[in-house]
Image (cartoon, coloured by chain):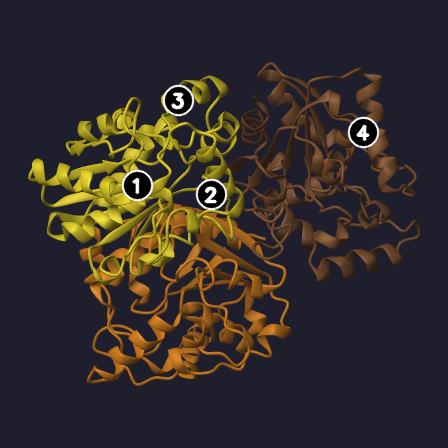
Chain colours: A orange, B brown, C yellow
């Protein structure tokens, strides 16, 4: 398979390295572009359209076709828009604990009120309007399956997240008219969104119409804590 | 244990072979009758009462008692009516991702609206009024844990499903008065019914009153993808 | 870690032995006090405050600090009140399929109506007002992952449960103001509370605010059926 992995908030493409290595060892071609406005030392003043365009550009510059396009978390909002732009390049969409906004919604419309106000106030308190992940939220709700040393090591890899792409309302009429095959990977201990009323699955997955479900044990950041296990789930989700 | 396995829609008793072999290897007696109106080259013009009677006949002709009676999917509606007819023969009911209709309901009353209209229109388009499983639904929502070759191999085993038994409203007053012990097996990646509001568990299991839960990983058709694992779950569900 | 395990209804501290042994083998200090009014041959006429006080006394008499305080089931209501009394002694709270009542609620307010009336009528029928666990409920809904022999062996370990602590309304204003770190362990086949509307997770866990989730396969009594597995989950839930 030709797999393009689109990271989530606070991440860049670099953190996929262990997962990408596991997939390459199984014979797959793996790309890990970084979304515009993400990483250290880059301009955080980007909107959702620019983020999307950076991935579309990557696909076009590398002339990639027959792509299994995976989005993690916030990356789900990106792949929804990327497939609208270049549907002919995409063989299958894979959402891994990812947002699937309804037409007209933003990412922020899809998180519980306490997260919405937290992100808003962190953005307002920041010199460049970006949002820094608080360590305790990371440790308890994002890498709940890691030990403290791994939680600290991975926290140090994070960079602040631009706010505007979370807030932009997305026109997804075309996305909801497409029939590109799609899969949802659910990590069963993921509490980055609180399970239940505001949870990932089946709230987000259920919006995909006919889709394939793959589950694995692990947290929202099982890419760090069990990259081989996630690679196997990506293979099951991405194959024909 | 003496186990009678009642298959679901689009299946016959023959497809149980790998599960039955695993159970027999563990010392159990296993029966896999085919429900009336199911399979290739048989009259699809049957109603739910005839389907039930075919299994009651099987139990009586073979003089089976102390039976662990398992129903898969649509087979759940059959075992609810079989135990009404011959409660003295049944030691325990086991529902494996199976329908447990409420009194007065049909199977169709228990599936989401988009499945109801799909089955209706497939039936109307068919010369004998039966319902053929669309391959993409099979591949994504029924055998989501299989590779493509296994999805194609198992799809070729299916036969069209009579429509009337899905539509018949079932009088289940006696079923809901019985105290036959009962278990529910839930495969955690089963999306044949969409998880959540219309899901198998706990929507169906919760109607059983006091019941035993057994879970295993796998799809709606884990009988094909992991027959040994399903056999172990059946043992845990069926034992005293 | 210094771990204090607070048992649930019908139990005493003694039944933790296999779990405690597994934790001690991994280098942890483990305490398993028995809550007042629990066990054979003791006065069942206790209220919730006396139950709480018995655990507070234990912590103070043994001068325990930096405690990972775990409550199982009913034990959740105890640890909520213990941390109010001695917050300076507690490093982290761990709720294992445990009740987390809202301010002003009793345990009985948090169980489905059929359990509420069952416990009430069992209490009224008992000479000392206590509640005896019915064997069939134990076998099907509490140790659903055990075989019959193990269900019988463990049933013989149980003692009748005082009723008043279930019925006492708890003032939990201070608990809900504390920021003691907290984890929730969920056994995925636990049906002691019916999954869904009345289930453990995410209904109870979701009341904890920012918390860490750990899941393991097993029933409400996985302490008997897989004590090593539970010990590993306690380590993941209790560590910093």
Residue A33 against residue A17 in the figure, above or below: below
Q: Earlier in the sequence, mark 3 or mark 2?
A: 3
Task: Measure the C-alpha gap from mark 4 to mark 1.
Answer: 45 Å
Label 4 crowd (10 A; few <14 / some 14-19 / many >=20): some
Q: Which residue is mark 4?
A: B85
- Mark 1, Cα crowd under 10 Å, few <14 / some 14-19 / many 20+, is many
For label 2, the residue is C193
Kindly identify which chain the residue marked by label 2 belongs to.
C
Give the chain letter at badge 4: B
Q: Is residue A45 above or below residue A207?
A: below
SS type, badge 1: helix
Mark 1 or mark 2: name the one nearer the start of the chain: 1
Distance of label 2 from label 4 (alpha carbons): 32 Å
Q: Chain of mark 1?
A: C
Foreground pick, B185 / B32:
B185
Displayed quadrant of residue A51: bottom left
Tag on residue C154? 3
Please identify, in this view, whether the residue under mark 4 or under mark 1 is nearer the observer: 1
Question: Marks 4 and 3, how far apart in space?
Answer: 36 Å
Q: Residue B219 appears at what percent x and percent y?
A: 58, 43
Taking the spot 85% from the left edge, 18% from the top edge, the residue there is: B61
Q: Report the residue at 71% width, 47% height from top.
A: B102
Query: How many residues crowd around disc 2 within 10 Å: few (fewer than 14), some, or many (20 or more)?
Result: many
> Label 1 belongs to which residue?
C75
Please say whether residue A149 is visible from this viewpoint: no
Residues tagged 3 and 1 counted as in contact (Cβ below 8 A): no
Residue A193: tell me if it is visible: yes
């Amino acid at each position: 398979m030709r797999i393009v992995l689109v990271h989530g908030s606070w991440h860049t493409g670099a953190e996929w390295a262990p997962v990408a290595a596991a997939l390459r060892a199984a014979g797959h071609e793996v790309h890990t572009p970084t979304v515009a406005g993400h990483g250290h030392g880059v301009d955080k003043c980007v909107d959702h359209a620019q983020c999307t365009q950076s991935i579309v550009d990557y696909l076009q510059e590398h002339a990639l076709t027959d792509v299994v396009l995976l989005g993690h978390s916030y990356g789900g909002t990106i792949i929804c828009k990327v497939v609208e732009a270049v549907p002919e390049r995409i063989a299958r969409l894979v959402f891994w604990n990812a947002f699937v906004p309804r037409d007209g919604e933003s990412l922020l419309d899809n998180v519980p009120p306490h997260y919405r106000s937290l992100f808003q106030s962190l953005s307002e308190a920041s010199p460049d309007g970006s949002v820094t992940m608080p360590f305790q939220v990371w440790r308890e709700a994002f890498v709940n399956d890691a030990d403290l040393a791994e939680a600290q090591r991975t926290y140090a890899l994070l960079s602040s997240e631009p706010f505007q792409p979370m807030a932009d309302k997305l026109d997804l009429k075309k996305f909801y008219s497409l029939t590109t095959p799609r899969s949802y990977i659910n990590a069963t201990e993921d509490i980055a969104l609180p399970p239940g009323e505001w949870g990932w699955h089946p709230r987000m997955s259920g919006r995909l119409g006919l889709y394939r479900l793959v589950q694995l044990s692990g947290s929202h950041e099982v890419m760090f804590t069990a990259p081989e296990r996630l690679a196997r789930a990506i293979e099951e989700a991405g194959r024909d």
